[in-house]
Amino acid sequence: MADDQKPLLIKRYASRRLYNTETSDYVTLEDIAGFIRGGREVKIVDLKSGDDLTRQYLLQIIAEHESRGESVLPTNVLNDLVRSYTTTATSAVPQFLAASFEMFRDSQSKWMENMNKANPMSGVPGFDAIQAQQEAFLKAMTGKMGGTWSAPSKDEDDTSPKPAETKPSNDDLDAIKTQLAELQKKLSKLDK
């Protein structure tokens, strides 16, 4: 197991100070919360007894965030959690919560993957038609074969004579009209 996959060991001294065993310095609860937000697992143990205090400190971090108004847990969920300690459902609650958060993490990571792709709009129905229509429009407007805009280089002089602008041909306008009609058909199908 790689070092970044092993839980970060934090030792609690008798003075209640928390000691990061990797960096050999003292840390705060906020530091620990930062490690966790960064994707690192943390294990907090009492130096003297060796007791695992991780749950206690994680609950304390949650309580501090909730008390500062950074509410993540709605009151009805907190009520249900309190109730779960007094019912026979106690054994099912941890598995349910773990499975729920696992599904949440999976969907969140898939969403982030889609957002980080070269073009996050590529999955939108009809996007290809919109993109083709935009390229044809740019081609018609600029008189160029490609649909890309380029800024003048530093060597080009704004006062230099420009080549005569070409008007879009009828073929280009017809292509735009055809693509626009196709796009309107696709959009009307999506509305139904």
Image: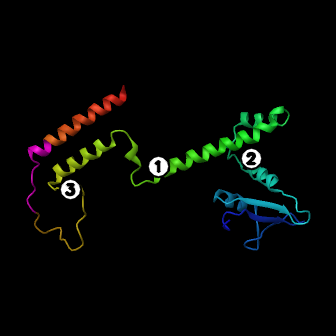
Residue that lies at the very extreme toward the front in this rendered image: 1
Question: In the displayed structure, would residue 179 be above or below residue 16?
Answer: above
Q: Residue at x 24, y 58 (%)?
A: 149
Q: Is residue 46 magenta?
A: no
Report the quarter where the N terminus lies: bottom right
From mark 2 to mark 1, how far is it between C-alphas?
34 Å
Residue toward you, 86 or 167: 86
Question: Residue 174 location, x and y as percent?
Answer: 13, 40
Q: Amino acid at mark 3?
A: Gly
Q: Nearer the viewer, residue 151 or 168?
A: 168
Tag 3 secondary structure: loop
The amino acid type of the residue labelled 1 equals: Asn
From the image, tell me which residue sits under label 2: 67
Name the mark nearer the viewer: 2 or 1: 1
Q: Label 2: few (<14), some or many (≥20) within 10 Å? A: few
Q: Which residues are magenta?
A: 163-173
Q: Kindly identify which residue carries mark 1.
A: 114
Q: Say which amino acid is labelled 2.
A: Ser
Magenta part mainly helix, strand or loop?
Answer: loop
What residue is disc 3 on? 146
| Cα separation between marks 1 and 3 | 27 Å
Q: How is the image coloured?
A: rainbow
Q: Are marks 1 and 3 in contact (CB under 8 Å)?
A: no
